[in-house]
């Protein structure tokens, strides 16, 4: 593996249920992949495709919650792919596969029951992140969101689900991209950092070939006034509970 051991940290996700190695510096996993994993409505034995899988946190947390799934993560950074493979091995989950690939490439990936992503959404007009690895992971050109959506939706079975975690500013574009890709947006779930604060993240669910009306779900508060996780957030982030989207 190219990344030296000294450049990695080994920790845990879901209060120790998942062993997790990631780069010591640069783009490190935060809440997004854990929340995304909690929202994918997979069952044991189903196939799940993730775009931009990084070090594998989403598929690892999903496996810890659901049991054996067949997961494929696509990631453009070969070094992160190697770390994700190491994480799958650390947890003894050979059913998780990670490949160095462009999500929008025309390779044959499917079919899948579910697809998900924490896609790039920082447009050139925005303020770029000072961290190089985060900037690469989140930088997007005009149309990137639509291309990612179309590519992931392509490999879904009928009635398969597509789940993205995005900032509220990206919601209109994401909903349009879902609809254009044949994955009708059926629900969105916002997250508030604290009670009374504006949402910074939300989950968007689409279902392929669905006619279900769209619903804006009651949001979730992540932190109490003193900064601790709320009990509801703890159930998801530490106990591995599912999120109903």
Image: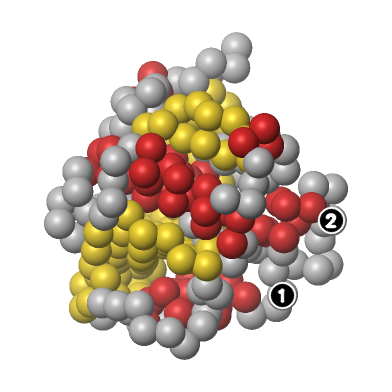
Residue 92: name its quadrant: top left
20 displayed left or right of 22: left
Residue furthest top as drawn:
226
243 displayed left or right of 195: left
Residue 98: name its quadrant: bottom left
Q: Residue at x 84, y 48 (%)?
A: 130
Q: CA distance from mark 1 to mark 2?
A: 13 Å
Residue 155's tag is: none
Q: Is disc 2 placed on a helix, strand or loop?
A: loop
Relative depth, front residue between 128 and 97: 97
Q: Are marks 1 and 2 in contact (CB under 8 Å)?
A: no
Mark count: 2
Q: Position of residue 157 (x, y in %)?
A: 23, 77
Q: Position of residue 85 (x, y in %)?
A: 44, 51
Residue 127's tag is: 2
Residue of label 1: 141
Q: Is residue 112 visible?
A: yes
Q: Is disc 1 placed on a helix, strand or loop?
A: loop
Q: Is residue 185 above or below residue 117?
A: below
| Classed neighbour count for the residue bearing mark 2: other residues with Cα under 10 Å, few (<14), some (14–19), many (≥20) | few
Q: Position of residue 102 (x, y in %)?
A: 55, 75
Q: Is residue 211 visible?
A: no
Q: Is residue 35 above or below residue 118?
A: above
């Amino acid at each position: 593996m190219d990344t030296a051991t000294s450049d990695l940290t080994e920790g845990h996700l879901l209060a120790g249920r998942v062993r997790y190695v990631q780069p010591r510096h640069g783009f490190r996993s935060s809440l997004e992949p854990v929340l995304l994993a909690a929202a994918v409505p997979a069952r044991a034995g189903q196939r799940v495709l993730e775009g931009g899988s990084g070090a594998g946190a989403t598929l690892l947390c999903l496996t810890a919650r659901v049991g054996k799934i067949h997961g494929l993560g696509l990631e453009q950074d070969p070094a992160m792919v190697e770390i994700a493979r190491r994480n799958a091995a650390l947890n003894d989950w050979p059913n998780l596969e990670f490949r160095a690939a462009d999500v929008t490439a025309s390779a044959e990936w499917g079919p899948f029951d579910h697809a998900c992503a924490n896609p790039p959404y920082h447009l050139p007009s925005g303020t770029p992140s000072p961290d190089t690895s985060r900037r690469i992971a989140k930088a997007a050109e005009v149309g990137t969101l639509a291309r990612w959506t179309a590519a992931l939706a392509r490999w879904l079975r009928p009635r398969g689900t597509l789940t993205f975690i995005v900032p509220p500013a990206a919601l209109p574009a994401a909903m349009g991209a879902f609809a254009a890709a044949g994955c009708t947006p059926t629900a969105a779930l916002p997250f508030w950092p604290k009670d009374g604060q504006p949402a910074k993240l939300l989950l968007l669910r689409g279902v392929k070939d669905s006619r279900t009306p769209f619903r804006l779900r009651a949001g979730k508060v992540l932190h109490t006034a003193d900064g601790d996780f709320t009990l509801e957030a703890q159930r998801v982030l530490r106990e591995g509970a599912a999120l109903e989207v």
